[in-house]
Image (cartoon, rainbow, N blue to C red):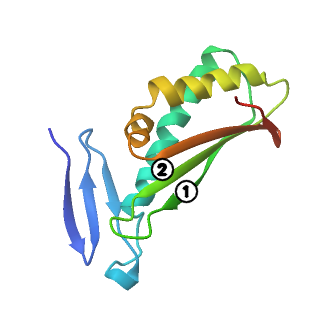
Amino acid sequence: MCAYVRSVKGLAFSGMTDSGHWLMMDTKEGVGGLEGAVAPMEMFLQAIMGCTGMDVVSLLKKMKVHYTSFEIHEEHEKAQEHPKVFTRIGLTYRLEGDDIDPEKVKKAVRLSMVRYCSVTAMAKATVDMSWKIEINGEAVQTS
C-alpha cells in the first residue's frame, strides 16, 4: 500500500496513511484554506513531539519511572522567506509526580533524541533542535 492525499475543497485535503488511517489537513482562510484542520507544518511539529514522546514514555516505563503527567511543549522559529522552513525547534519535556529520578528522565530523552526517534533524526538534518526537561515545574540540568 502507499499513502495519498485528495483535494476536498479549497486547500483542504484528506489523506490516507500507509497504515490505513485517515487524516485531514487545511490552512488559513487568507491563503485559500477553510481553517478546518491542522496545517502540514503544524502536523510536522506534532509528528516530532508524538515520536519522541512515545519513545520517552516507553523508556520511562522500562526504567520503572512513575509520573502523573507527561507533556511536551515546543517553540520554533521559521525562515522569513519562502520556503518558510523551520530554522529552530526547541522541545520542553514536562513531567509531574513524586520521586521522579531526573537522571532516568535525562537518559530517556537523550536516547529518544539521538537514537530512536526517526522523525527527529530527519528534522535534525536541517533544523537546529534543542531540548530541556522540567520536573514538577523545576528545570533539570541536561548538559
Earlier residue among tags 2 and 1: 2
- Residue 6 image offset from top left, x and y in percent: 19, 62
Quarter of the image with the N terminus is top left
Q: Check the image and report above or below for 83 versus 90.
A: below
- Residue 20 image offset from top left, x and y in percent: 25, 42
- Three-letter residue code for mark 1: His
- Three-letter residue code for mark 2: Gln
Q: Check disc 2 and report its element: helix, strand or loop.
A: helix
User: Mark 1 sits on what residue?
Assistant: 76
- The crowd level at tag 1 (other Cα within 10 Å; few <14, some 14-19, many 20+) is some
* Dot label at residue 46: 2
Going 53% across and 43% down the picture, which residue do you hit? Answer: 129
Going 66% across and 14% down the picture, which residue do you hit? Answer: 63
Classify residue 8 as left or right of residue 65: left
Q: Check the image and report above or below for 120 versus 74.
A: above
Residue reaching furthest to the bottom = 30
Q: Check the image and report above or below for 101 versus 117.
A: above
Classify residue 117 as left or right of residue 67: left
The quarter of the picture where residue 136 lies is top right
Quarter of the image with the C terminus is top right
Q: Check disc 1 and report its element: helix, strand or loop.
A: strand
Q: CA distance from mark 2 to mark 1?
A: 12 Å
